[in-house]
Image (cartoon, grey):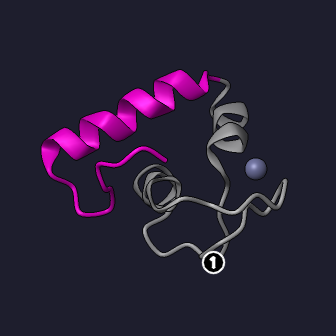
Amino acid sequence: MANCKKCGAVLSFNEVGLYKKLIDMEPKEFLCKSCLAEYFNCSTDLLDKKIGHFIYLGCTLFENNCD
Ligand SMILES: [Zn+2]
């Protein structure tokens, strides 16, 4: 599993998927959800909603579990 390039947190499957979806489909480095929220200047709640939406759409970059 990947680590956040900023804070070093271990990324969940869905955080990796979110980074790919929003930033780069073939990333060499990743940001965790809280660092992504900072990057976009939005709340982690909004990112959770986006993850939920991608799961709803059936996107294979995400899995429906509690992470
Ligand atoms: Zn981070």
- Residue 57, image quadrant: top left
Which residue shows up at 64% across the image and 33% down it? 37
Q: Is residue 5 left or right of residue 67?
A: right
- Check the image and name the residue furthest to the front: 66
Which residue shows up at 49% across the image and 32% down it? 47
Above or below 7: residue 1: below
Q: Is residue 16 left or right of residue 43?
A: left
- Rendering coords of residue 40 (x, y %): 63, 32
Q: What stretch is highlighted in magenta?
A: 42-67
Q: Does the magenta stretch include residue 7?
A: no
Using the image as rendered, state which of residue 60 and residue 41 is in the foreground: 60
What residue is pinned by disc 1?
A: 28
- Rendering coords of residue 60 (x, y %): 23, 63
Above or below 17: residue 47: above
Which residue shows up at 21% across the image and 55% down it? 59
Q: Is residue 54 magenta?
A: yes
- Residue type at mark 1 is Lys
